[in-house]
Image (cartoon, grey):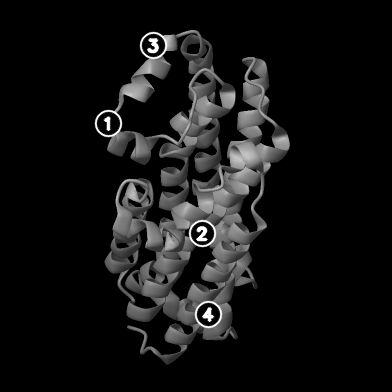
Amino acid sequence: MLRSVLLKTLHDQRRALPAWVVSLALLVGIYVALWPSIRDQPSMGDFLQSMPPALRALFATSGADLSTPTGYIQVELLSFMGPLLLIIYAVTSGAAAVAVEEERRTLDLLLSNPVSRGRLVLEKAAAMVFGTLALAAVTGFALVLEGSLADMALPADRVAATMLHMGLLAVVFGAVALLIGAGTGSATASRAVPAVLAVVMYVGNGLAPLVSWLEPVRPISPFYQFSAHDPLRTGLSVTSAVVATLTVVGFVALAAAAFRRRDVAG
């Protein structure tokens, strides 16, 4: 067994992580390949503008224009599919960190080593963060590289900022999965609760411009911290990145505290 929990966790993902990398690169390639046929179709822009306001608020960034590379990627990749895939990876990793190990009866083997419970949670969280941000970086790299082959010019610095915000969005829900898994030992709950929370936060953030009572609470949604300042057009928002990072740190600290006090199933 590797001496580091972080390295062991990444070693356990030696097959899954490369599969994610290839899948995301292929997904970006599909969107890039469709771009030449979309940009010359003014009807696509008309279709976007003809959508009901509620649907446009949920699935398209405000002011998105399908005739430009930035608007096309905002609508097709960043509004739904990109965040969804990274959240799935992060929640799966966060749930696997403690709860899945416990259900498979492999957690005792980890704890039999000279590793404190707090350190175990922190290194598992670090592996989840590393994997998620690595996948976000791969998505951005594929977007710039493959886009350049299809005359889809996207500013690399804005893409990098967008991928950082998207990675942090996913890590927030991964940290929620870790907290629930560390506090309850239930793999089912550690997957289901963050998934439901992500749906509620996504819908709430999307509909807030149309529903007056949602607007005041919109800033607490991680999706607001990801997309409200439109990072693909405006770049990095330090404030949003700090809010997301502090949220993750808070959830991981709570997870470590909860795991220290819990009677682990044998």
Above or below, comparing residue 63 to residue 4 in the picture: above
> Mark 2 or mark 3, which has the lower sequence index?
3
User: From the viewer's perspective, is the residue at label 2 or at label 3 nearer?
Assistant: 3
Check disc 1 and report its element: helix, strand or loop: loop
- Classify mark 4: helix, strand or loop: helix
Point out the tag, 1 or 4, that comes first from the N-terminus: 1
Residue in the picture at 37% in, 24% down = 49
Q: Is residue 33 above or below residue 62?
A: above
Asked whether the beta carbons under mark 1 and mark 3 sit within 8 Å of each other, the answer is no
Q: Which residue is mark 2?
A: 171
Residue type at the position of mark 1: Pro
| Type of amino acid at the residue the image marks with label 2 | Val
Residue 51 picture location, percent across and down: 30, 27
**Which quarter of the rendered picture does the C terminus lie within?**
bottom left
Give the Cα distance between marks 1 and 4: 42 Å
Question: In the figure, is residue 130 to the left or right of 206?
Answer: right
Assess whether mark 4 and mark 3 are in contact (beta carbons under 8 angstroms): no
Where residue 180 appears, as percent x and y from the top left, is: 37, 73
| Mark pair 2, 4: CA separation | 14 Å
Can see residue 13?
no
Q: Earlier in the sequence, mark 1 or mark 3?
A: 3
Type of amino acid under label 3: Ser
Q: What numbered label is drawn on residue 43? A: 3
The residue under label 1 is 52
The residue tagged 4 is 253
Q: Between residue 147 and residue 232, name the one nearer to us.
A: 232
Quadrant position of residue 85: top left
Q: CA distance from mark 1 to mark 3?
A: 16 Å
- Above or below residue 106? Residue 50 is above
Amino acid carrying mark 4 in the image? Ala
Q: Earlier in the sequence, mark 2 or mark 4?
A: 2
